[in-house]
Amino acid sequence: MVTGLVLVRLEAGKERQALIKIKEIKGVSHVSAVYGRWDLVVDVEADDLPTMTRVVIEKLRAIQGVSGTETLVTTAI
C-alpha cells in the first residue's frame, strides 16, 4: 500500500464542483480545504506507485477547475 498527500490548487469559481468530483475518485480517502498557496490537501491510497500516478495524473488533474498539484508520497522513518 502506498499513501500520499496531494496538494491541489483550484481555479476561482470552480472550487465546489472540483471538490465534489475529487471526493468521488477511487483511492481518495480524505480531503481537507486549507488556506495558503494550496486550496486542498487530498489523502490518496493506492496499491502501488504506478496506480497512485494514474490516480493523480489521469483522474485528479483531469478535473475541470484543478489548476495544479504537488504530490508528497509518504514514507516510514
Image (cartoon, rainbow, N blue to C red):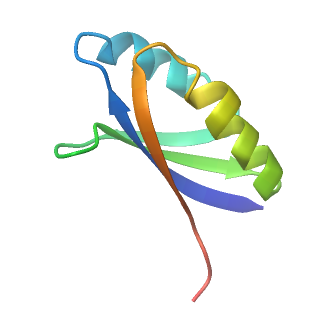
The quadrant in which the C terminus is found is bottom right
Which residue is pictured at 81% across the width and 50% down the height?
Answer: 50
Rendered view: 68 above or below 25: below
Out of 55 and 67, give the one closest to the viewer: 67
Tell me how many marks there are: 0
The quadrant in which the N terminus is found is bottom right
Rendered view: 45 above or below 14: below
Which residue is pictured at 23% across the width and 17% down the height?
Answer: 12
User: Residue 58 at x, y = what percent?
Assistant: 69, 28
Furthest residue in direction bottom, as rendered: 77
Rendered view: 4 above or below 61: below
Left/right placement of residue 21 relative to residue 12 reads: right
User: Residue 67 at x, y = what percent?
Assistant: 39, 27
Out of 76 and 12, give the one closest to the viewer: 12
Left/right placement of residue 35 relative to residue 20 reads: left
Which residue is pictured at 74% across the width and 38% down the height?
Answer: 54
